[in-house]
Image (cartoon, coloured by chain):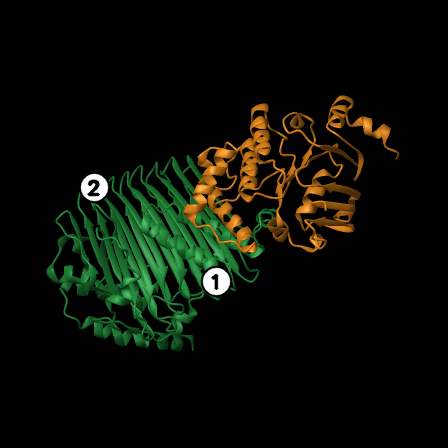
Chain colours: A green, B orange
Amino acid sequence: MIELMERTDRAHYEADLKRVQALESPAWMKDIREAGAARFAEMDFPHYKQEAWRLTNVGPVVKTPFRSVVGEPSGHVTPDDVAAHLYDAPEWTQLVFVDGFLSRELSRMGDSTQAVRVGGIGEAVAKGDEILEEHLAKSAEYTNAFVALNTAFLQDGAYIHVSEGAAPSAPIHLLFISTGVDTIASYPRNLIILGKSAEAEIVESYVGLNNTAGYLNNVVTEIVMEDNATLRRYKVVREGSAGHHLATTKVMQGRDTNFHSFSISLTGQIVRNELDVVLGGEGANALLSGLYLNDGDRLIDNALRVTHASPKCYSRMAYKGVLDGTSRSVFTGKVLVPQGSQQTDSNQLNNNLLLSDKATLDTKPQLEIFADDVKCTHGATIGGFPRELIFYFQSRGMTEAMAHAILTFGFASEIVDKINIDPLRERLSKYVFDKYRPK
Amino acid sequence: MAMLEISNLHVSVDGHEILKGVNLIVDAGEVHAIMGPNGSGKSTLALALAGHGAYEVTEGSVTFLGHDDFLDMPPEERARLGLFLAFQYPVEIPGISNAYFLQSALNEMRKSHGMEELDAFEFQDLLAEKMELVKVDPSFADRNVNEGFSGGEKKRNEILQMAVMEPRLAILDETDSGLDIDALRIVAEGINRLRGKDRAFVLVTHYQRMLNYVKPDFVHVLYQGKFAKSGGPELALELEDKGYDWLKESVPA
């Protein structure tokens, strides 16, 4: 019986896989998709019996017969639809993807030079690109069936290559628009490569235009950082209210690299951000910050894993959550320190603000340490505002509701204020302020 | 009519009666000092007047600026009427700048009085002027409220808030405690600059030292939940001289 249901769950994917496999592509690309499809055929969908998904019920996603986007976007998007989600910054390069496909018409392309290449994976595959071929689908592991699906449906996404010593003068913005015209599944696939001593700032925005359709945005991002490279990556999830976002990011860091990650989860029905960082060279640093604003009956899951594969590496996780309604939030901070990774320095913090006694949180540090000269700490908090704090506001003429709003804003601002791209910080700050101000 | 009239005030905390019949009349322009040993009920009086929920008024009445329903008002309404409490232990507010906090507070107050709200620029000018008046560093504006402030800085920040809020009645709860002499002098100067014929002060203090810098018109000594003695500034000196043990002998059990 279970066997039979499993087949029903997959039938729609299998039909669409035949369509994607029929697309004209170079042989190496077809091989990647087929490898993904083969892995998908072997894997079960995540379910609660697997430790990594014990608290994350993706049943609604597994049960929906999505129509996978093949060949072209599902819906039409106009410049007016995207204007509000772009940044008014002429010097930025801003790529717009619709249901995972690059739209050159909607994008504001900067000068793609030999030193800094910014474009779509689809066009690069068609034209031929050795570096792309060398790295695409090489680092992301098949941690779950959704990664396998993304690979099996791999067609387009962002491709950024910053060559050795180069640094774009302005941030690169990748805007992923989900049209969500019906229950579609789209599969953006991103590859970001930073050469030795290269630097970049990248903003990834995931925006849904439709608040009623339960679409799925299944995203995989692979990031490769060669020695001494610095990357600041800002990911903002603003999917439609009924849309789902399941994303896996794999980061391979070389020696003396600096990776700063900000993950901001605002809207979407089920949101899972898997972030898997491998510190693969001595002196690599990973600073992973996050903010999730959960409410209603939504689910937000941040699953982080940092592997200290080399000695003398440094990692920090600092995630904050605001929990309202009957929402469910999950935070997992896994740190692996293999034997030999001496002088590892790792710390994780997960602080949560509870605005409703019906919201739930599961926060879980997982430390697996096999070296003996390490410093690994972790901490988590959950709570509301102390009575004395509220009274302080009241004694200055402000109501309890206003105190809550300002304090919630302040709680979230501690993450937002660290964002050093002004237009992004200001937009997020305004979003947080408007969300919690007394109505 | 008096600005503040307290009659036979009884206040309990967790079912324990702390204030047992306090009477006090404060007129505009006056400075009253309330002294007393630890545990006599000084802070209870201050917090009960500000409307802290843990302090339950079981008997008596308080009229402020003619409002005889004062005790029925929530704390924010009392503040908007013009009551200000400088806290003994000001709380830290992470993520919120002093400037933003004070702008929000002042605008709530202005709205309740039918006045236009100040925008960020207008408020910036006002804040700069007040910081100059009470001699606090301009960096206070952008620092988060009391976060990482030293004890002295927190007390000075309370004085800055008072300068911005321009209350009719300011109750200062042990604002002098824990300050070194330089900090005390700065705080006292701030208070003196804010004195005026329309404004009254109640200084709650454990030590006479502050009264060398801020001259009170009246001194009251709180002991076991009641005023044991009231008098002029000389009473503070007498207390300093004889110590609080002197009260035990002079007050009938």
Q: Name the residue nearer the viewer: A423 or A233.
A: A423
Q: Is residue A29 left or right of residue A436?
A: left
Mark closest to the chain's N terminus, 2 or 1: 2
Numbered mark located on residue A295 in the image? 1
Residue farthest to the right?
B252
Question: If the image is split into quadrants, where does the C terminus of chain B sit?
Answer: top right
* Quarter of the image where one finds residue A237: bottom left
Callout 1 amino acid: Asp
Circle 2 is placed at which residue position?
A196
Q: Is residue B49 left or right of residue A203?
A: right
Q: Is residue A407 left or right of residue A225?
A: right
Between label 2 and label 1, give the one nearer the viewer: 1
Under tag 1, what secondary structure? Answer: loop
Instruction: Decide: is A43 above or below B74.
Output: below
Callout 2 amino acid: Lys
Instruction: Decide: is B179 above or below A278.
Output: above
Residue in view at x 36 percent, y 77 percent = A8
